[in-house]
């Protein structure tokens, strides 16, 4: 394995001896979180459907001098998630942190065109998988206490302005409600769970976005120049969101649970 990349901020060993699982960890925000956890000392398991990207991120993790486990699977399948947790337990004997980042935008379309199959696919991929991942990892997390971060969105939690995104926004709102519902229950097992709601982030999520006939329902609105006010319109990088994720996972956030944080450079305040 490669030589560990040093850090000047004293966080290089923050997750030393810890094990983290990142779903959707081969791309986008999940990949950014996986790499940042490794930089801070964690052993990282990546669970994603894309075998080729899994191998790429495994190489990146090992280049940081960290052990990595990549598992190709479907977050919509409970048996595959349970098998992934079993492999983590067999490999490292523990699980301390979970990042639930797998998801899709799905089909954006007028309500009268959105099919039940398209609706269900988005809800199952984003929301049901959050339930399944939390449930599957709970037995390992409660052994020594642990933390979970769910990646939601500004859409469905603070803004509702994107035409045709009924299924996506509902799934994201559901993630937030789920976290708040289970936070007290999990707290009794020394497990914290929080939600990050990003705005615009440079990722490959567009590959899983399928807009259709949105001009039929789009209402003409003039938005201010530079929607991400704090950054003059510049979108976040996955690494920017990863900094927040690792904070919420860490002992520095030991009194924070059942909480949502918007990481959008004030975008949702402009659009709300």
Image (tube, grey):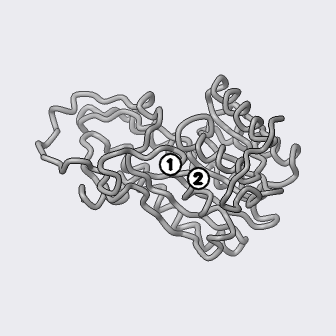
Q: Position of residue 3 (x, y in %)?
A: 80, 40
Q: Residue at x 62, y 57 (%)?
A: 246
Circle 1 packing at 10 Å, graded few (<14), some (14-19), many (20+), is many
Q: Quadrant of the N terminus?
A: top right
The correct choice, above or below, for 52 with respect to 118 in the image is above
Residues 36 and 163: in front is: 36
Q: Secondary structure at mark 2?
A: helix
Q: Is residue 101 left or right of residue 225?
A: right
Residue 234 quadrant: top left
Q: Residue at x 42, y 60 (%)?
A: 262
Marks 1 and 2 sit apart, C-alpha to C-alpha, by 7 Å
Q: Position of residue 91 (x, y in %)?
A: 87, 43
Q: Position of residue 38 (x, y in %)?
A: 72, 47
Residue, disc 1: 127
Residue ranking furthest to the top: 52
Q: Residue at x 80, y 36 (%)?
A: 2
Residue, disc 2: 131
The correct choice, above or below, for 29 with respect to 11 in the image is above
Q: Residue at x 56, y 46 (%)?
A: 101
Q: Is residue 167 left or right of residue 84?
A: left
The correct choice, above or below, for 252 with respect to 49 in the image is below
Q: Secondary structure at mark 1?
A: helix
The correct choice, above or below, for 11 with respect to 32 in the image is below
Residue 49 quadrant: top right
Labels 1 & 2 near each other (Cβ < 8 A): yes
């Amino acid at each position: 394995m490669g030589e560990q990349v040093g850090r000047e901020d004293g966080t290089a060993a923050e997750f030393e001896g810890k094990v983290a699982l990142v779903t959707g960890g081969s791309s986008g925000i999940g990949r950014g979180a996986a790499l940042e956890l490794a930089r801070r000392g964690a052993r990282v398991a990546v669970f994603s459907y894309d075998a080729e990207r899994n191998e790429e991120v495994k190489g990146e993790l090992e280049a940081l001098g960290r052990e990595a486990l990549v598992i190709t699977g479907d977050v919509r399948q409970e048996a595959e998630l349970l098998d992934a947790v079993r492999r983590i337990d067999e490999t490292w004997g523990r699980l301390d942190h979970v990042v639930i980042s797998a998801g899709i935008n799905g089909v954006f379309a007028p309500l009268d065109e959105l099919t039940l199959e398209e609706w269900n696919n988005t809800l199952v991929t984003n929301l049901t998988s959050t339930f399944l991942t939390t449930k599957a990892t709970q037995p390992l997390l409660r052994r020594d206490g642990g933390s979970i971060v769910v990646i939601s969105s500004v859409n469905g939690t603070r803004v509702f302005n994107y035409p045709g995104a009924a299924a996506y926004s509902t799934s994201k709102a559901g993630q937030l409600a789920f976290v708040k519902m289970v936070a007290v229950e999990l707290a009794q097992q020394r497990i914290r769970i929080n939600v990050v709601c990003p705005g615009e982030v440079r990722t490959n999520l567009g590959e899983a976005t399928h807009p259709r006939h949105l001009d039929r329902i789009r209402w003409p609105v003039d938005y201010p120049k530079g929607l991400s006010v704090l950054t003059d319109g510049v979108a976040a990088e996955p690494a920017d969101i990863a900094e927040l994720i690792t904070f919420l996972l860490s002992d520095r956030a030991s009194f924070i649970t059942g909480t949502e944080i918007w990481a959008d450079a004030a975008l949702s305040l402009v659009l709300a």
